[in-house]
Image (cartoon, rainbow, N blue to C red):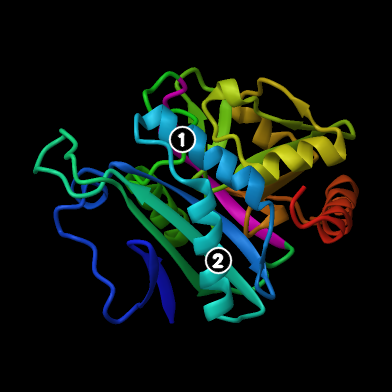
């Protein structure tokens, strides 16, 4: 396997990042995950735009997006596979121990791992921890993911694939790595970005392609919604058949099934929408 590091391709067995990299010591970094089908990335432009926004929000130097594009193309060409998880990681680079950044420049890593198509339905849980809709990192896709690791581990312990958060005022927010949609009286709703959720690329396309409404929703909506589904880069649109102890036995319901079909058709028509 080959990855991109320090301006070129390197073997994964010998590639090395310093133990003093700020992304490792304090989580000072950002990332993007893209789906790659037969060596072609999906929605690359949107992902790079968000990478740049996250860099600005974290105060990192603007990434060279032309280099990132070259890196993605090189890694995909070097590692052919039918379905891949393409990961772009960009950190504060070599820095002193502590929160201050160094002056040695940033680190860019692009790597690829093989993956499989997700099941059509899944189960989720809610967790007691909250998203802070007013935090310094709200809306940024940073490498500070330990909170998600803890919540996702809880989900796996309970036989689910995702954990859903409320924000600090009890509104439905997002999953550890997904956005959440609910169907109420035949209409699709999803929490607005102001709820504290990440502005997911798949979320934005799903809103555009299905006409979903952005609505403030209480966490309790999960107990009464007719249908629930998740969106993310690797899930695409995925129906939910269980929320905590509540079964949605007919998942995917008719509205979700139509959203899944629309997604597959539109995504196949344009790899960089």
Secondary structure under tag 2 reads strand
Return the residue nearer the eye: 4 or 222. 4
Name the magenta segment's main secondary structure. Answer: strand
Up the image or down, 228 lies above or below 24; here it is above
In the image, what residue occupies the spot 61% across and 40% down?
A: 200
126 in magenta: yes
Up the image or down, 201 lies above or below 167; here it is below
Left/right of residue 247 with respect to residue 86 in the rendered view: right
Q: Give the range drawn in magenta.
A: 121-133
Query: Residue 63's spot in the image, x, y percent?
Result: 43, 43
In the image, what residue occupies the spot 78% across and 36% down?
A: 207
User: Tag 2 or tag 1, which sits nearer the N-term?
Assistant: 1
Query: Residue 81's spot in the image, x, y percent?
Result: 61, 81
Up the image or down, 73 lies above or below 204; here it is below
Which disc is residue 84 wearing? none
Query: Which residue position holds label 1?
Result: 54
Up the image or down, 261 lies above or below 185; here it is below
- Residue 193 picture quarter: top right
Return the residue nearer the eye: 144 or 226. 144
10 in magenta: no
- Residue 7 picture quarter: bottom left
From where the camera sits, is residue 36 visible? yes
Left/right of residue 254 with respect to residue 148 in the rendered view: right
Return the residue nearer the eye: 176 or 85. 85
In the image, what residue occupies the spot 35% across and 43% down?
A: 147
Which disc is residue 85 wearing? 2
Query: Residue 131's spot in the image, x, y percent?
Result: 44, 30
Separation (CA) of disc 1 from disc 2: 20 Å
From where the camera sits, is residue 159 visible? no
Query: Residue 208's spot in the image, x, y percent?
Result: 81, 36
Looking at the image, which residue sits at the far left?
97
């Amino acid at each position: 396997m080959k990855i991109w590091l320090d301006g070129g391709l390197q073997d994964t067995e010998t590639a090395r990042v310093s133990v003093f990299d700020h992304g490792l010591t304090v989580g000072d970094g950002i990332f993007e995950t893209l789906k790659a089908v037969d060596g072609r990335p999906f929605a690359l432009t949107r992902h790079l735009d968000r990478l740049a926004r996250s860099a600005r929000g974290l105060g990192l130097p603007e990434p060279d997006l032309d280099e990132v594009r070259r890196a993605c193309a090189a890694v995909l060409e070097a590692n052919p596979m039918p379905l891949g998880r393409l990961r772009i990681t960009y950190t504060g680079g070599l820095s002193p121990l502590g929160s201050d950044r160094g002056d040695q420049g940033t680190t860019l890593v692009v790597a690829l791992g093989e993956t499989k198509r997700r099941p059509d339905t899944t189960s989720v849980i809610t967790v007691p921890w909250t998203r802070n809709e007013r935090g310094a990192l709200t809306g940024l896709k940073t490498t500070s993911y330990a909170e998600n690791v803890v919540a996702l581990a809880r989900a796996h312990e309970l036989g689910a694939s995702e954990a859903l958060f409320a924000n600090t005022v009890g509104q439905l927010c997002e999953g550890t790595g997904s956005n959440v949609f609910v169907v109420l009286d035949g209409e699709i709703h999803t929490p607005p970005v102001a709820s504290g959720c990440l502005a997911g690329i798949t979320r934005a396309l799903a809103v555009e392609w299905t006409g979903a409404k952005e609505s403030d929703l209480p966490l309790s909506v999960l107990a009464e919604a007719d249908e629930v589904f998740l969106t993310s880069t690797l899930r695409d649109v995925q129906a939910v058949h269980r929320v905590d102890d509540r079964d949605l036995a007919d998942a995917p319901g008719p509205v979700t099934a139509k959203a899944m079909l629309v997604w597959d058709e539109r995504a196949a028509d344009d790899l960089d929408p």
